[in-house]
Image: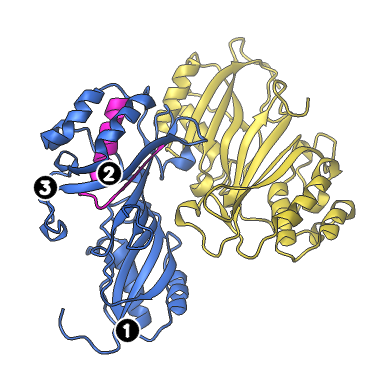
Chain colours: A blue, B yellow
Amino acid sequence: MGKQPLNLRNVKLTLSFDGTSFSGWQRQKNARTIQGELEDKLAIMTGEQTVVHGAGRTDAGVHALAMTAHFATSATISCFAFRRGLNSMLAESIRVQQVEDVDLSFHSRISARAKAYQYFFTTDELLPPCRRLYCAHLPGPFDMDRVACCLPYILGQHDFTSFEATGSRDREKTCGRGAIREIFAVSLSPVARPAREYVFEICGDGFLRKMVRNIVGTLIEVGQQRMTVNDFAGLLARKDRNLAGPTAPACGLFLKKVYYEEGCPAA
Amino acid sequence: MGKQPLNLRNVKLTLSFDGTSFSGWQRQKNARTIQGELEDKLAIMTGEQTVVHGAGRTDAGVHALAMTAHFATSATISCFAFRRGLNSMLAESIRVQQVEDVDLSFHSRISARAKAYQYFFTTDELLPPCRRLYCAHLPGPFDMDRVACCLPYILGQHDFTSFEATGSRDREKTCGRGAIREIFAVSLSPVARPAREYVFEICGDGFLRKMVRNIVGTLIEVGQQRMTVNDFAGLLARKDRNLAGPTAPACGLFLKKVYYEEGCPAA
């Protein structure tokens, strides 16, 4: 980083959004994105062009319950006024829950110690209309116990190449660890209502591109008897994306929480 | 009714819908409605113009988990084919759950013995983005116990004029009972997550126009300390809509179920 004015602040945002009508997090020309909306509204408030750095780049259609981000500003606007101002200007599909002044060393992505995701899907023949934007439709006979047998194989530190989106990896973001990530917790549970809806939860120190959706897509293959538990168990060692299942739809995925030093499940 | 062809069938539909982008149930010129969509798709399938009679006329923005309706047809299409055909042609915001041949005497509205509604609202300062289409935002300090004290006054048979939408009553629909309706069950419960979301449930033999939303709007007045429990208790006897609270927003309301002879909670 270059020279900074003495009064430069580092501001952390915690926000939730409905990703349905956004082309993901990352700013794009001619497309509505979460980052773009935030930067545009902040420019109006501060008179400065600032980059809002997110803890990750959610894909188009993915939702967030508590995404984190940070930006630099020399504005003297209070955190309270930032929160109120942003929420009054942003669409209701983005809500800023918290605005905090943080140490200049804080970086929403690099400082993150863990992330937790939820993935909702239904195996029912019909997708309930009021769940269709927030729950993937993966119909068919589904054996939850078969999937439960797969989960321990994901836990711990592994090379997740088999579940990484094909295409070039963003080397800047790998922090020298390649495709190795550590998963701290993973679970699959039925949702009380409606029937045949499930929620998959996963928490780890980081995730490769489309890794959660590729894991879910592969677990569905096992639950719907198109792949054996044994095949699943061998997938990580094979390091071959072509052996895993399809990428599950974006609409079922929620970034639930980003953990920093305090309260990190890895500790 | 006039003369009917001998092969006339009476077909019952059970359906769910997301009311967000519909102008309610009732067919209208130049507006997208649930009834209009169903009638249009049935006309394509059967080659007949038929009226789809609903168990009630939901307002714009109101949702349904299990609405019922019926229509007459001389088509020989099987119930299975009706269900599959309708679901393939309708938008995902309407799903036909069940199609059944029923007795010619069955009428989705007149034969109904009870209806159950749910109303979701949050009193939190922020409306969670992914709940905004299905949960009303009524922010402010909220005392659930005060509302609980009001609920017994609604139970049983009453003249609900105080909670009826102003404007002319549809006399055809009153079945000679004016504004008298019987409420079988009523409750208010916190939703597990997110915090400060509540669900109000009510089941009765019938509901006047906007009655559920007017009751909820008035209960919110009590819960947010703008009306006393005593005032609420006296409302029904006063038979004056002007004394009750505002109409709660449409998006929180779900028609949960329509009961016929079997399994009716009134029995």
Q: Could you say whether the residue bearing mark 2 is in a helix, strand or loop? A: helix
The range drawn in magenta is A199-223
Figure quadrant of residue B141: bottom right
Q: Earlier in the sequence, mark 2 or mark 1?
A: 1
Mark toward the start of the polypeptide (3 vs 1): 1
Q: Are marks 3 and 2 on the same chain?
A: yes
The kind of residue tagged 2 is Val
Q: Residues within 10 Å of mark 1 (few under 14, many from 20)?
A: few
CB atoms of marks 2 and 1 within 8 Å: no
The amino acid marked with disc number 3 is Gly
Horizontal side of residue A34 vs B117, given as left or right: left
Pinpoint the chain carrying mark 2: A
Q: Is residue B23 left or right of residue A176?
A: right
What residue did someone put label 3 on? A167
Q: Is residue A113 visible?
A: yes
Q: Please tell me the numbered disc located at residue A212.
A: 2
Vertical placement of B58 versus A80: above or below?
above
For image coordinates 58% across by 10% down, the residue present is B7
Residues at discs 3 and 2 in contact (Cβ within 8 Å): no
Could you say which is closer to the camera, residue B46 or residue B226?
A: B226
* Residue depicted at x 42% and y 26%: A125
In this rendering, the answer to whether B12 lies above or below B221 is: above
Task: Identify residue type, mark 1.
Answer: Gly
